[in-house]
Amino acid sequence: MSHLQALRDLGQSLWLDNITREILDNGTLQRYISDFGVTGLTSNPTIFDEAIGNSSAYDAGIRQKNAAGTHGEAMFIELALEDLRRAADLFRPVFDATHGVDGWVSMEVSPLLAADTAGSIEAASHIHEQGARENLYVKIPGTPAGVPAIEESIFNGVPINVTLLFSTSQYLASAHAYLRGIERRIAAGRDPSVESVASLFVSRWDKASADALPVELHNRLGIAVAQQTYRAYRELLASDRWKKLAAAGARPQRLLWASTGTKDPAAPDTLYVEALAAPDTVNTIPEKTLKAFADHGKIDAPLADDGGEFAATLAKISAAGVDIDALAEKLQRDGAVAFVNSWTQLMQRIADKAKALAGAGS
């Protein structure tokens, strides 16, 4: 697994972008930890919808919870947290060894709360408490309503994985929310060490822009935006504002690359992993892409602190007619809608399964 080791050696954490009860039960996740050096994982409503819909592994739990009077969202949260607690326990050794920098799992607040600041704050607190694991991130989208929820949750001591970020400006909004939360904790005499990651979605840019761009510009926009965002990330970590917080004991909010599976069959299957090999970052990788990189991935050079030649690429794409700022907003809105759709489908799937299992048992 020397290809994966090269990523780890330069300071990038490798997380799995998947969880199912099956990979917990059959030892696959443990093998990814032992053999691939995976040190965390992420989940979302789409992942759980596929896991529960395509498996009988959750049937016993659904039957039991339904009989106990637990339904809908409450049932899903219990099912998901059962999986995530088990995963968190598998990652606990690396969490302890890295003093909380690595070894995390993530659980999303309801996507129905994407425009509800107060509801997101309350849900994040509830999941944090119910999860009962130090190494459980709560995912809040970096939407306009999510940004103040991120700040308040950090102030409340809830570790946050900021999701659905697509642009540098969206990243910076969430990063400054994190900093404000930490600054308020220091002012209140609280421990400033509250962990967070900021998840920038990459490949969706290229899928969304492909029809508007000539072939030579395909699969370049997502990487260019990521490079631009990495520069902003490094600049933030070099700022006097951050240095003051670090001196007080705060931890940096790490930048996380999300949506790094290649969607274009004409592109290399390790495209985004290779391009975004960068120190002090996380790459959360689909299983298929993880195996591909382990087999034949390569790193020519780590991502430069200044992001490299992204400006020229963005200029060419803008000149080709793509409004990058407008597309960023659209991608975030569409991403929120997609998670709502997955959530709605998931709730219906659980209700249908509960009804069928209750009927089968009567």
Image: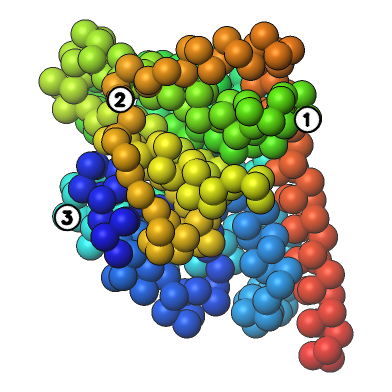
Q: Is residue 161 left or right of residue 315?
A: left
| Image quadrant where residue 240 sits | top left
In the figure, 273 relative to 184: above or below?
Answer: below
Give the x, y percent position of residue 261: 56, 49
Q: Which residue is mark 2?
A: 304
In the figure, 203 relative to 350: above or below?
Answer: above
Q: Residue at x 40, y 59 (%)?
A: 296
Mark closest to the chain's N terminus, 3 or 1: 3
Quarter of the image containing the C terminus? Answer: bottom right
Q: Which residue is mark 1?
A: 211
Which of 246 and 198 lies nearest the eye of the viewer? Answer: 198
| Foreground label between 2 and 3 | 2
Is label 2 in contact with label 3 (beta carbons under 8 Å)? no
The three-letter amino acid code for the residue at tag 2 is Ala
Q: Residue at x 59, y 45 (%)?
A: 267
Q: Residue at x 60, y 34 (%)?
A: 219
Q: Residue at x 69, y 36 (%)?
A: 207
Q: Which residue is mark 3?
A: 97
Question: What is the CA distance from the residue labelled 3 to the residue labelled 1?
Answer: 46 Å
Number of on-image labels: 3
| Image quadrant where residue 94 sits | bottom left
The three-letter amino acid code for the residue at tag 3 is Ala
Is label 3 in contact with label 1 (beta carbons under 8 Å)? no
User: In what element is the residue under mark 3?
Assistant: helix
* Residue 108 in view (yes/no): no
Give the x, y percent position of residue 210: 72, 31
| Image quadrant where residue 72 sits | bottom right
